[in-house]
Amino acid sequence: MIVVERIAELRDRCETARRAGETVGLVPTMGFFHEGHRSLMRAARANHDFVVTTIFVNPLQFGENEDLAAYPRDLVADTAAAEADGVDVLFVPSVPEMYPEPTVTTVHVAGLTDGLCGASRPTHFDGVTTVVAKLFSIVGPSTSYFGRKDFQQLVVVRRMAADLDLPVQVVGCPLVREPDGVAMSSRNAYLSDDERGRATGIFASLRAAAAVVGDGERDPERVRAAVGTEAARHGLELEYAEVRRAADLAPLATVDGEVVVAVAAAVGKARLIDNVTMQIAGAEVSTDLGVIQIAEQESTS
Ligand code: AMP
């Protein structure tokens, strides 16, 4: 594995791979790897000749009072993990390398970015789509891998690629959870033991949503209420709990078809997000809560 800091070098290496007939898979990240990130790298490795992972804590996607400066970093551990997962190039640009001049050009995906996380983070998704568009342009991947944990991000990036005819397939990979159900996140590093315990209430609130829908509830407001009640039982105040159509995050009159229940909650200093998707056809409900990491695997990873 090669660690690259310069855009020109990354572009050259990807160009060389493509010229040799290799397919390029891309995994954009902000680093501080856990099994969620690693599952994306392994998916890319399984499907491509040439795998690029990027680590860039992108200032453009952080709001003024957010955790940009505190965001956890560990390049030594990340390098070892990426190498172990078969990454060919790890791209770790500096901020001036990515943004040598103040950014006056941004990519904005309208509508999809207004609600859910966009409501409290109004500039966040423009930062994400702008940096992802740059990475697509530099790397030229045939496929880019994103986690379903950041469900709105996945929908937004997919729509950007479609609207701009970017020649890249956007693949959503399963949400990976800790053995107790807490969604893996670099931001879990901010949690005290007590907060970490309360964070399990987020998963419990999503399971409550799945349970009421499984029992036949089709009113989005009642599903939201079930989520809120369970969260409160764990001492959590949710920033939002929304029931939306999974394909385009449209509000629903009835819980039917492919649906996402998405939540955000502040737990101590950490703002955590999570979701469950359900496929509903009549009385049939199939629920996707992601993948729970078994403890043994975790300790050997
Ligand atoms: P981040 O470093 O948080 O920007 O995340 C980089 C990529 O990893 C994004 O596509 C995330 O959706 C994905 N990711 C983060 N956490 C998880 C998780 N628990 N399960 C699956 N994918 C994840």
Image (spheres, grey):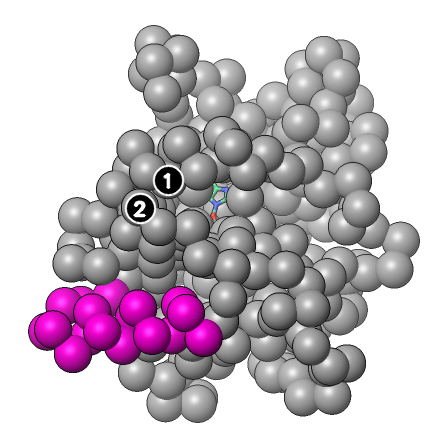
Q: Is residue 64 left or right of residue 4?
A: right
Q: Position of residue 84 (x, y in %)?
A: 30, 33
Residue nearest the viewer, comparing 259 with 16: 16
Q: Position of residue 265 (x, y in %)?
A: 73, 39
Per the rendering, the mark at residue 82 is 1
Does residue 7 appear in this view?
yes
Q: Position of residue 113 (x, y in %)?
A: 64, 72
Other-residue count near label 1 (Cα within 10 Å), few / some / many at <14 / 14–19 / ≥20: many
**Most frequent secondary structure within the magenta stretch:** helix
Does 115 appear above or below 181?
A: below
Residue at 78% over, 40% down = 70
Q: State the extent of the magenta-drawn residues as a range.
A: 8-24
Circle 2 sits on which residue?
A: 1
- Element marked by disc 2: loop
Does 41 appear above or below 113?
A: above
Q: Position of residue 139 (x, y in %)?
A: 37, 72
Residue at 76% over, 17% down = 192
Callout count: 2
Q: Is residue 23 left or right of residue 230?
A: left
Cα distance in 3D space between marks 2 and 1: 8 Å
Amino acid tagged 1: Ala
Q: Residue furthest right?
A: 65
Residue 18 included in the magenta stretch of the image: yes
